[in-house]
């Protein structure tokens, strides 16, 4: 056993068969084919997660997804397997979104988009209009949530990452995460109640 | 419990929220209308949030992947060490090679242990002595005048300075430094021509030519000598003499003798000049040193040795040294056939 680190060789069909952990390990030694495989595997998840978290438009969303995967590539060496790869990736996406959201510029842009939607006729609301109103209320309330509460809600309730996994990925205690999740749910519940 | 309002047995909102993630259903919540309603409201919020639209995909996934891979190639962890090797290690190795090749040449040019090198270090045209005239009567009869003089050597009753160059040449140190910087500059240009990557190291050579401890002490000693602080001058010049490989060892030994003589430490001056003559028999200052030593020996009463050394000084081609040696011989009571130059 020489201990020499073998380069990750991309073979036909081999990458798709590798586990997430193996792909991350390959990323850790600079193998871009592994990154491409991870991108194919998690792009949709990361895109949806960031969309819910940041409310960015399509172009910004793709930029954030790309930035997230680049950060994954850079930080792959630091992955120690303490949490699942998916939640670890979400944790990186959270940091990317946090940096992106600083300055409130993106949030304001998202709010302006919501404001531009024509108001529903509240005097004779039909079912479709009521549903759209509630959806707008949820979207607005979600984007008005503090970042940590929003992250907890999106990660646990929308992406269905377990509380323990989410807490590990975010580097917080499970109790803290539960508190944030509960506060987020209550805030959204109140917003929808007031809106309807 | 059939009540519509919240009872004391109902869980708090936090407990309700926690039950959302619980796999086991709570019997109270299922039976309680209030709790069921609250739980349903929470579930509705989550369901609504899950239906929030995601911006439409642009559909250029292959392009995005290719772009991502291209960006990752630039920041690849495996690529970084290669860049470090190219940008740091290669120039350092080239610079080290340039220094290893050129340093011996540079040291050979700057270290003057041999006579020929000493001549190149010693100023060919030393600064003329300050025209300080000392009346012989004001000096002790057995001590040589400590300063140079332009008084007529043939005039009776007046002592003549033992040699003409007791005042340190002011630009001597600067000449040493200039020579070093010049060598460093040539070294730098040569290194750059052969090893472009060696620019950094050669810049260091040219910007900060190495100054040895002996040279520093010599500079301090000369400065103290010029300032009249003979105690400091002898201390610093002795320190300079303590560096036998110094580029200015010859000058240090000579000026140490001068400093001792000016400090009227006759025995120490004799020792210093004798060491100078032993170590640098071919020095351009040999005549000066011999004449100075002769005056010291005369002060100690060693007339025979003084006479021999004065005669050696007479053969020196420097007029001031010649005059001083002739004055010494006159002092010894012996007329010389050599006329005043």
Image (cartoon, coloured by chain):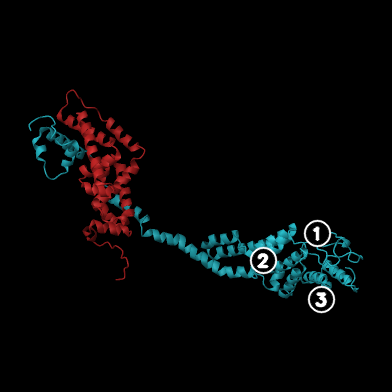
Callout 1: chain = B
Q: Earlier in the sequence, mark 3 or mark 2?
A: 2
Q: Nearer the viewer, mark 1 or mark 3?
A: 3
Tell me, yes or no, if residue A78 can be seen here: yes
Please tell me which residue lies in front, A179 or B267. B267
**Left or right of residue A178: residue B168:** right
Please give the label number shown on residue B130.
1
Element on which disc 3 rests: helix
Towards the viewer: B277 or A149: B277
The residue that disc 2 covers is B240
Q: Vertically, is B172 above or below B309?
A: above
Q: Which color has been applied to chain A in this rendered view?
A: red
Query: On the same chain: label 1 and label 3?
Result: yes
Label 1 vs label 2, nearer the camera: 2
Question: Dot 1: what SS?
Answer: loop
Tell me how far mark 3 sits from mark 2, CA to CA: 28 Å
Q: Secondary structure at mark 2?
A: helix
């Amino acid at each position: 056993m020489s201990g020499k680190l073998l380069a990750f060789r991309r073979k036909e069909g081999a990458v798709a068969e590798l586990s997430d952990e193996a792909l991350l390990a390959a990323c850790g030694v600079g193998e871009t084919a592994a990154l491409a495989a991870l991108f194919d595997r998690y792009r949709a998840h990361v895109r949806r997660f960031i969309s819910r978290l940041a409310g960015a438009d399509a172009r910004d969303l793709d930029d954030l997804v790309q930035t997230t995967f680049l950060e994954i590539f850079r930080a792959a060496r630091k992955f120690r397997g303490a949490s699942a790869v998916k939640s670890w990736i979400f944790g990186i996406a959270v940091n990317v979104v946090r940096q992106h959201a600083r300055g409130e510029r993106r949030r304001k842009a998202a709010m302006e988009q919501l404001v531009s939607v024509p108001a529903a006729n509240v005097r004779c609301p039909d079912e479709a209009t009521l549903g759209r109103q509630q959806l707008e209320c949820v979207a607005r309330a979600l984007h008005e949530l503090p970042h940590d509460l929003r992250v907890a809600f999106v990660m646990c309730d929308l992406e269905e990452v377990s509380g323990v996994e989410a807490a590990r990925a975010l580097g917080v205690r499970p109790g803290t995460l539960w508190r944030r999740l509960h506060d987020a749910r209550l805030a959204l519940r109140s917003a929808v109640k007031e809106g309807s | 419990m059939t009540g519509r309002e919240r009872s004391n047995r109902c869980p708090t909102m936090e407990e309700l929220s926690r039950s959302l993630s619980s796999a086991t259903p709570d019997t109270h919540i299922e039976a309680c209308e209030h709790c069921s309603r609250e739980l349903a409201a929470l579930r509705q919020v989550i369901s609504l949030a899950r239906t929030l639209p995601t911006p439409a995909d642009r559909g250029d996934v292959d392009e995005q992947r290719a772009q991502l891979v291209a960006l990752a190639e630039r920041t690849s962890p495996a690529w970084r060490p290669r860049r470090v090797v190219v940008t740091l290690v290669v120039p350092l190795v080239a610079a080290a090679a340039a220094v290893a090749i050129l340093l011996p040449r540079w040291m050979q040019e700057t270290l003057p242990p041999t006579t020929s090198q000493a001549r190149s270090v010693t100023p060919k045209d030393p600064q003329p002595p300050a025209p300080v005239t000392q009346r012989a009567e004001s000096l002790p009869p057995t001590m040589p005048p400590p300063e140079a003089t332009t008084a007529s050597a043939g005039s009776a009753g007046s002592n003549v300075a033992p040699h003409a160059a007791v005042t340190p040449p002011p630009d001597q140190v600067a000449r040493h430094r200039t020579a070093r910087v010049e060598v460093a500059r040539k070294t730098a240009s040569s290194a750059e021509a052969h090893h472009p990557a060696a620019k950094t190291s050669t810049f260091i050579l040219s910007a900060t030519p190495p100054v040895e401890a002996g040279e520093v002490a010599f500079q301090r000693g000369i400065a103290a000598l010029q300032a009249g602080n003979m105690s400091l001058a002898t201390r610093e010049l002795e320190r300079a003499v303590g560096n036998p490989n110094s580029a200015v060892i010859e000058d240090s030994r000579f000026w140490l003798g001068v400093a001792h003589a000016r400090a009227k430490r006759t025995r120490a001056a004799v020792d210093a000049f004798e060491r100078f003559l032993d170590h640098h028999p071919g020095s351009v200052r040999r005549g000066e040193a011999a004449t100075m030593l002769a005056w010291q020996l005369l002060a100690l009463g060693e007339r025979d040795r003084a006479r021999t050394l004065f005669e050696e000084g007479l053969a020196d081609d420097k007029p001031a040294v010649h005059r001083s040696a002739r004055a010494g011989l006159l002092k010894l009571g012996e007329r010389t056939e050599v006329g005043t130059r």
